Image (cartoon, rainbow, N blue to C red):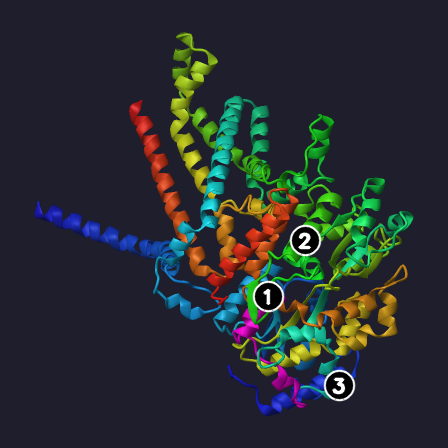
Amino acid sequence: MQGKLPRRRILATGLATGGLLALPGKAPAAVGSKPLKGVTLNVSCWSAPYPQFLAKYIPEFEEQTGARVVYTTPAFPIYNQRMDIALATRSEAYDVINVTFIYIGRWVGAGWVTPLDQFMDDPKRTPAAWDAKDFLTGTTSAFKDSHGRLCAIPWIADIMMAGASRYDLIRKAGFTLPDTFDEMPKMLKAVNGQQGIPGFITENHYGWTFIGYLQGFGANIFRNPPHDLMPVLDTPEAVHAAGFFSDLLRSYGPKGALSYTYDEVVATLQNGRTIYSTENEAFVTPMAQPTSKVAKTCGFSLFPAGPKGRFPQLATHGWGIPAGSRHKDAAWQFIVWAMSKDLLLRMFRDQGWSSVTRRSIIEMPEFKKKLSHNGFDVAKMYLDTIDLAAKGYMAYRTVPPYPQVDRQIDIAIQSIISGEKTAKQAMAAAQTNAIAQLRRAGVKL
Amino acid sequence: MSARTGWANAQRRAFTLGLAPALIVLAVVTLAPAIYLVVTSLTPLTPVNPASLLNFSDPLGNYRQALFGSSFLHSVRLQLELSVITVGLQTAVGVGLALLLNLESRFMEAVRTGFLVPMVLPPIVVAIIWKVLYTPGISPLYGALGALGIPVGSLITNPVAALPAIALADTWEWFPFTMLMVLAALQMMPTEQLEAARIDGAGAMQMFWYVRLPFIRPALTVAVLFRLIDSIKAFPLIYVLTNGGPGQATEVTNYYAFIQTFNFAYWGYGSAIATMMVAGVFVLSFAVNRLGGAQAADE
């Protein structure tokens, strides 16, 4: 096996990809020989709609380039554990991988993922029409290393927004979707229990669903991430935010609200069994699709703003190349193909993939029309949220020891909702434990 | 005489040589990973820094951190609670049902087979069944309790009820194991002993306590030992039902080790916890065996 592909092959690959990009929806059958013949690319991503959609098009890439693609999509936790080990040991087992958002600090920070600028800036490897600048800044900024080099191409922007399965009940009670935290309890008090339906739910990963509230009240996880990682979870603002958020779930949530995972939240909204939620935007399609029980009654809005502003959370995942890969050029050609405008557009048209990261697609009238539901312009909300996140308030999430702090936040919010502790006690405990965890991880505080 | 000794030596050598491949495979498959586990427990191993595998500067650091911190000890306390409740319930239900089902008839055979179903289900399926049963809104359990005038909130999100709820699900899954072991022992019981006790005028309780229980005790000891060891490995139910929560109400040692190892990437620390768990299982096995042996000797 060779470490690098011959120059001639690289050139041919570039031409092949250029051809691919020039022919929307079709593989460039007429472009010369198969430049990646004999190359086996090992590609892996966690199981999600996009990688599943992509699987259907991979034979086209193989047919076009001659490469053989071994494509695996294990479940999220299994993927991350497997990849953590593969990357840490500089394994050659993978050529294209998903760089998982919560692992960016560890994987990119440790130099386990190849910087992609060298490929993007080379016109022989990347046709100008591919347009790397088209990817939204709010999604690409997370993937930059300490030298400012991009280490992954984002394939999804998972944003947090608000949605109501029974907007009709909210309107009937004389309210609209809340734009601020102040409006939330008023609206929820009015609609909670209408037709026996509880008012509010979020998934029980509070290190994710609570943070928009924490920041909206002017608090944060760390003092100034990623440079100053002193936790600030016990400030009066943080305690107030924890009390406010827990009270929403305790007062207006369904029985057993603490046990709701994301899938359960989506299912309960889709069936109209809970009225309102602040959650990942992936709940839009299940609620709005024609077969949904709430297709005609659902409504959507931006994540509500707190007294200190609006902080909808954003997670992004991207294609990257492990440092240990022996087929980096071929791997880049795969990424160029997978993230081309034409293929993404085909995926949107053929399969309804809408969490795209290219501005040009989001701004297309066709896209906006498809993401308009009951008069709500979801495409605009999506774009506005990603632009908001570009301000950098998500920096806390990509620091390597965040999973440890995330767990402390989960425990704190669960303790408040279950009545084990007051908000002040729970957040004080979270602060103490977070400091201990960070010190243990070698962070100097 | 010397010819016989020579033959015995040759025979011993032949047996040793014959056994050697199996012993080597056993050592590689069983002992080597265990030794590796112990070795990594002496390091601060984390995938972020592969060189940490060779860092033996503070070999007892992980153990010190576990034994002098609160989280590990909290998890051990929960583990003990869970093990005592589940093994106690499984033993009681298993023995009770075995006594009831110890009759020769086709109907009883069918009933016995039905009782075995939970044990042969994949653990994750069992967890999903109980997730449905414990979820208000879709579970008939809460409706039934409400109809009986005992309205309760979600059991798995209540910090007091969550661990007993896990124990109940675990009991449902594993009582057939105890039942099966005891039933097998009961069916091997000589009828003469029972006849003699009956002629002597023994009542049902006396028959159980003085005749049946002593007879099934060895099988029961083995069943309890297996269930104790298995209870320490409880994972799928907790992973699916409570995720260790609410708060840390169900974060038993096994789950605690999982979080430390796979969520936080403290592999060395996770190995130390696993090593202590293995040691605990050995001590437990030894104690139960001794207890069973001592009781058998008394009789």
Q: Mark 2 or mark 1, which has the lower sequence index?
A: 1
Q: Which mark is residue A223?
A: 1
Q: Chain of mark 2?
A: A
Q: Give the Cα distance between marks 2 and 1.
A: 17 Å
Q: Amino acid at mark 1?
A: Arg
Q: Secondary structure at mark 1?
A: strand
Q: Amino acid at mark 3?
A: Ala
Residue B97 is one of the magenta-drawn residues: no
Q: Give the Cα distance between marks 2 and 3.
A: 50 Å
Q: Local crowd at mark 1 within 10 Å, few (<14), some, or many (≥20)?
A: some
In the image shown, does A220 or A142 lie closer to the viewer?
A220
| Picture coordinates of residue B263, whole percent (x, y) | 54, 58
All told, the count of numbered labels is: 3
Residue tagged 3: A129
| Picture coordinates of residue A36, whole percent (x, y) | 62, 82
Q: Mark 2 or mark 3, which has the lower sequence index?
A: 3
Q: Which mark is residue A240?
A: 2
| Boundaries of the magenta span | A100-125
Q: Give the Cα distance between marks 1 and 3.
A: 42 Å
In the image shown, does B117 or A200 lie closer to the viewer?
A200
